[in-house]
Each structure stands twice: as structure tokens, then as C-alpha cells.
Amino acid sequence: MAVVIDTTNNPPLRPRHPEKANKPDAPSPRKPDWIRVRAPASRGYADTNKIVRDNGLVTVCEEASCPNIGECWDRKHATFMVMGDTCTRACAFCNVRTGRPGPLDPNEPAGVAEATRKLGLKHVVVTSVDRDDLPDGGATHIAATVRAIRALCPATTIEILTPDFLRKDGALEVVVASKPDVFNHNLETVPGRYPEVRPGARYFHSVRLLQRVKELDPAMFTKSGIMVGLGEERHEVLQVMDDLRSADVDFITIGQYLQPTRKHHAVVNFVTPDEFKSYEKVAYTKGFLMVAASPLTRSSHHAGEDFARLKAAREALGPR
């Protein structure tokens, strides 16, 4: 479990999550055997780590304490997080640092493209912190990153995982115009949990954002994901599936929430592998082209392989 106090910039010590520092501990139940992973220690992991460091990049793999980092980095798969390492939101589930972000790095898009080239990525995932402080929420920067990757690595397919651009008129259009192959925006949880889990966001705004992507570019693949184990009921998860299908979303991911620190939202329950299988079957019956549902599923886990299956599933349907 990660710590709440950041000691990497010492002195001074500064809270990674100042809004949570004085909250009481929220203990979670003991992890079941099916949720455990090995600590990263491979040569491939070390090589990926060096490329990330040499290019001065931030990854969501590290910042969000992803349990799959050892597996993914061993295969030289990293998910880049642009616009800095500090988020303007303070979601109850997230381990990304919160606070006042610094200025954007104009060299970052080129750095992400160069790291993509060095890693030899056939499919790259780029996510970002929320930047409510920027007039466009960072849309222009994300679009510039997509274009930089496309210019340097034209054969690489690009998946973006964006913020919600709440109250940022025109921002979505800028990102869609950059032509990523997959547009991902996670709902994160069921609507009834938003006030506690994702208080800075609006559920139906996020659903509408995904629907709007398809209106702007019907050929673009759309994707969204939620976590379970936050106190949601099964019928609420099924309703989220219906809401996403009403927005013509192609791909849904469902994974187990894991508590980053004791100051974050507690894990209410661990969903069993059989329950995840059930969610997967139901999601396919509702019309999703691709479903990833397991305890360790994360948005960018096996993203390249999943994208290949996603394309194949659409092609099997014939002309749209």
C-alpha cells in the first residue's frame, strides 16, 4: 500500500493528498489470493523504467499505483500521463497527486512520441491528469501529443484516456479532430457513488461526452471503464452498461477497486472471478464489441491486444 506523505522532495515533506491527510483511516478487508501480483524485478521492467526516466515522462502506471506495472513494463508497455503529475481533482479512489499543477511542458508531446519510438510500441495509451485550471482543460496539449506520435510513429495506433472537460466548451472537438484510434473516458463508478467517490465529476456529462465523440466521428472507437468493490449493487453495474450502450460505446472494462492508502475510499468488497465472468457475459449480450472484466483489469492493461480484437469484432459485423 502506498504512503500518503511524499518524501521524494525532502525537505520539505509535503502531502501527496493534502485533502485526505486529516481524514480518519478507512481500513479495507484483506486481499484475496486472486488479487495478488509479483513485485516488478525483470530486465524488461528496468529497460522501460530507464526510457521513461531518460525522456522525463510521467506514467499512470506509477502515479496510480497500478498492480500490473511489473507485467506491462516487462513487455515494454507503458501508459504515459501528460500535463504533469498533479491533478486538480480529488477523487476518493485515486492515488495521483492532487494540488495546484505547474505550467505545461511544450516539449512533452515530442518526448512521448520519442519514448513510443524507443519502446517500439505498436499501440500506445496516453492519459492525463485533470487540468481544470486550463481554459481548454488541456485538450490542445492532448491533441498535440496525438499528432506528435502520429508524425514520428505512423504505424502505431493511439488510444487516449481523457478527462471529462467539464465546462470546457469546444475542448472535446479539439481532441477528436486529432484522430486518435480509440477515445477512452472512464465513468469509474455507478452514478449513485459519484458524490462520495468522484465528487468533482458528473455522471451523465461523462456519458454524454462519449456519445458526442461518436457524433463527431462515427468511425472512432470509444471505450469506458468502471471499478467495482466500492459499494455498488449489481443492478447498478448493469444500468451503467445500458447507459454506455445508449451512447454507442464499443468497449467496456470492469476491474476491482484497490485502496491506494488508508486515507482513500475503503474497499467495500472483493468481487470474485466468477462474478467478473458473469459481468463479461452480460456485457456482450448488451452489444459491446469488446469486454474486459477481471479483478486486475485496468483501462490500459493488454490495450494493444484488446484493440486488435476490437477491430476484428467490428469488421465481423460488416459495413456500418
Image (spheres, grey):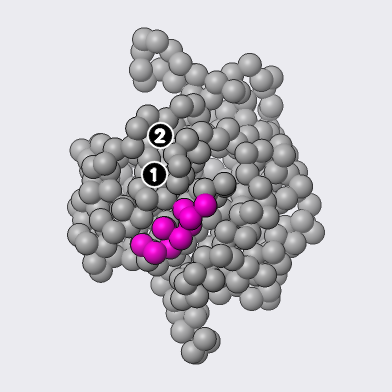
Front in this rendered view, residue 167 or 70: 167
* Horizontal arrangement in the rendering, residue 71 relative to residue 50 (left or right): right
Disc 2 residue type?
Asp
Residue 159 magenta-drawn? Answer: no
- The disc placed on residue 85 is 2
Tags 1 and 2 touching, CB below 8 Å: yes
Residue 287 is tagged as none
The x, y position of residue 237, in whole percent, is 72, 57
Q: Which residues are magenta?
A: 169-178
Q: Which residue position holds label 1?
A: 81
- Could you tell me if residue 237 is visible in this image? yes
Q: For numbered disc 1, what is the local secondary structure?
A: strand
Q: Measuring 36% from the left and 10% from the top, which residue is drawn there?
A: 11
- Where 38 falls versus 143 (above or below)? above
Q: Percent x, y for residue 148?
A: 25, 56
Q: Secondary structure at mark 2?
A: loop
Cα separation between marks 1 and 2: 8 Å
Quadrant assignment, res 39: top left
Task: Identify the residue at image location x=59%, y=18%.
Answer: 21
Across and down, in percent, residue 235 comes to 79, 59
Q: Give the class, few, some or many, for how many residues have Cα within 10 Å of label 1's Cα (few <14, many ≥20).
A: many
Residue that appears at 50% across and 75% down: 218
User: Where 110 falls versus 156 (above or below)?
Assistant: above
Q: Amino acid at mark 1?
A: Met
Are there few (<14), some (14-19), or many (20+) residues within 10 Å of tag 2? many
